[in-house]
Image: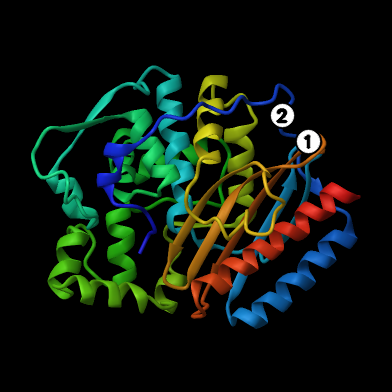
């Protein structure tokens, strides 16, 4: 299922300073990258697809020049990478005065039950968290309960998709909250509490772990157009949310800082990059899907590299699919750093 730490971890959440967005972090109009890089990227993806026995979609763009390359421009299940869009919708609402980062939101036992995340240390009513902390949990730990609370604040999946269309993003659709994405993958009815259904089907912790470990590609789910993204559309979204005036500067700084603190997917985009490379990113994982999207800060003021790598259909161990993402990210990093 969607990867994320237990919601009880919020009680130990430590504040971290926000990343200061560089003054020159401004998106440039997209244009094709050099044909040599495009061909090299296509060749690399072809080799990795054969190794994984799955499909890989990639888009990369140097923010400052707009140079863009893409392989397999088709929809992929977003899994938790769609939380980037949820964050943008919430921050837009904040920018227009409809909410605030310090606004407190109640979290109930029913919220835990819906997503199936353990709440062993939160057994009494009375838990409330600020929007800032919920956003932190959603993006750094990929917490599903926090995400569904942010969906509620944004107005639901339809409101998030409407936000995307308003800012010119057409290659991403958001149809379900986390609860129903999980229901869809496991074949449970939409609208029901996923956690309760999952626990009834797998009543012991051992059975639940075994079910998650056996999560394999689901061809029907992979082909479902709901909650999917074309890689270049996700790169467009990252560009608009991290380096354009569509969000206020304070919101861009907040979002960048949170994404830089992402705790999941250390072996994906970041996996083969030089130690200390700054990466603001968001992962997504479910079944045959292992994804990572984000922004790499290149060394020596060479710019900021946006990247989205999506996979589907592979039944190989997660670490092998993660390594494929790391290889693609390192190749793009080397090209834009050393040319």
User: What residue is at 18 percent from the left and 58 percent from the top?
Assistant: 193
User: Which quarter of the rendering shows the N terminus?
Assistant: bottom left
The residue carrying pointer 1 sits among few (fewer than 14), some (14 to 19) or many (20 or more) residues within 10 Å by Cα, namely some
Q: Give the left or right position of residue 243, taking residue 44 as reference.
A: left
- Numbered disc total: 2
Per the image, the residue denoted by label 1 is 64
State which quadrant residue 2 falls in.
bottom left
Q: Residue at x 72, y 51 (%)?
A: 274
Q: Quadrant of residue 140?
A: top left
Image coords of residue 333 (percent x, y) = 76, 52
Residue that appears at 77% across and 69% down: 42
On screen, residue 167 above or below 215: above
Expressed as whole percent of the image width and height from the top left, the position of residue 215 reads 37, 75
Question: Of the numbered discs in the image, which one, if any, rests on residue 26?
Answer: 2
Is mark 1 in CB contact (under 8 Å) with mark 2? yes
Label located before the other in sequence (1 or 2): 2
Vertical relation: 228 (above or below) 131: below
Residue 236 pos. (x, y %): 63, 44
């Amino acid at each position: 299922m969607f990867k994320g730490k237990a919601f009880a971890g919020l009680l130990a959440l430590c504040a971290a300073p926000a990343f200061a967005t560089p003054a020159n972090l401004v998106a440039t109009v997209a244009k094709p990258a050099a044909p040599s890089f495009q061909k090299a990227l296509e060749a690399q993806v072809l080799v990795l697809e054969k190794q994984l026995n799955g499909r890989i979609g990639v888009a990369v763009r140097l923010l400052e020049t707009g140079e863009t390359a893409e392989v397999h421009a088709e929809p992929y299940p977003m899994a938790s990478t769609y939380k980037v869009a949820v964050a943008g919708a919430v921050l837009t609402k904040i920018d227009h005065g409809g909410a605030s980062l310090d606004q407190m939101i109640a979290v109930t036992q029913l919220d835990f039950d819906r997503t199936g995340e353990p709440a062993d240390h939160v057994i009494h009513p009375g838990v409330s968290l600020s929007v800032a902390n919920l956003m932190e949990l959603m993006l750094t730990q990929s917490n599903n309960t926090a995400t569904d609370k942010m969906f509620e604040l944004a107005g639901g999946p339809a409101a998030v998709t409407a936000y995307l269309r308003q800012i010119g993003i057409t290659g991403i659709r958001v149809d379900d909250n986390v609860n129903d994405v999980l229901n869809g993958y496991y074949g449970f009815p939409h609208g029901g509490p996923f956690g309760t259904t999952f626990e009834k089907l797998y009543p012991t912790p051992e059975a639940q772990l075994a079910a998650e470990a056996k999560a394999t590609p689901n061809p029907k789910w992979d082909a479902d157009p709901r909650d999917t993204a074309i890689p270049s559309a996700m790169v467009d979204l990252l560009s608009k949310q991290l380096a354009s005036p569509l969000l206020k500067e304070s919101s861009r700084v907040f979002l960048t800082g949170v994404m830089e603190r992402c705790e999941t997917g250390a072996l994906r985009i970041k996996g083969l990059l030089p130690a200390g490379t700054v990466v603001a990113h968001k992962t997504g994982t479910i079944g045959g899907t292992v994804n990572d999207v984000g922004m790499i800060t290149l060394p020596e003021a060479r710019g900021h590299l946006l990247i989205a790598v999506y996979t589907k259909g592979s039944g190989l161990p997660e670490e092998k699919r993660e390594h494929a993402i790391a290889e693609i990210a390192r190749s793009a990093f080397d090209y834009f750093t050393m040319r």
